[in-house]
Amino acid sequence: MYEACPVCTQHYEPEVGFYWGAMYISYGLSVGIVVLVGLTLYYLAGDPPVWVYITSVAFAVILLTPLLFRYARALMLYWFGSIDYDQTKVPLTSRK
């Protein structure tokens, strides 16, 4: 991961240990996935055996762990990092 944004030079880690709070956000996202998979199995699969719940939830969480990690850090940076995105500060060559 870069130390700073190559376009706007925003530092990704404002202070040491800043992303420890992202673990809690990632945990909350994981709990949401567990609940969503559990309810989906209950209603669509007709309440299967416990081993199906455990296997499905474990597979979903392990499969989505890279996304959870990335989005938890991004949410932590936006919510608590005092990031204010300003389109006018972005160079014209990097705008799409």
Image (spheres, grey):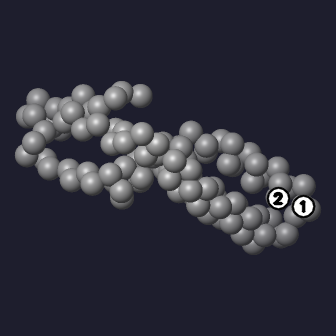
Q: Which residue is mark 2?
A: 53
**Amino acid type shown at disc 2:** Tyr
Q: Please tell me which residue is depicted at 36% across the width and 56% down the height of the picture.
A: 80
> Is 28 positioned to the left or the right of 8 in the image?
right
Callout 2 secondary element? helix
In the image, 30 versus 10, the foreground residue is 10
In the image, 7 versus 54, the foreground residue is 7
Callout 1 secondary element? helix
Q: Please tell me which residue is depicted at 10% across the width and 34% down the height of the picture.
A: 91
Against 1, residue 25 (above or below) is below
Residue 25, given in percent of the width and then of the height, sits at 53, 56
Q: Please tell me which residue is depicted at 56% across the width and 39% down the height of the picture.
A: 66
Q: Which residue is mark 1?
A: 50
Q: Residues within 10 Å of mark 2 (few under 14, many from 20)?
A: some
Task: Classify residue 89 by image quadrant.
Answer: top left
In the picture, which quadrant includes the C terminus? top left
- Can residue 73 be seen? yes
> Is 6 positioned to the left or the right of 30 in the image?
left
Residue 27, given in percent of the width and then of the height, sits at 61, 56
In the picture, which quadrant includes the N terminus? top left
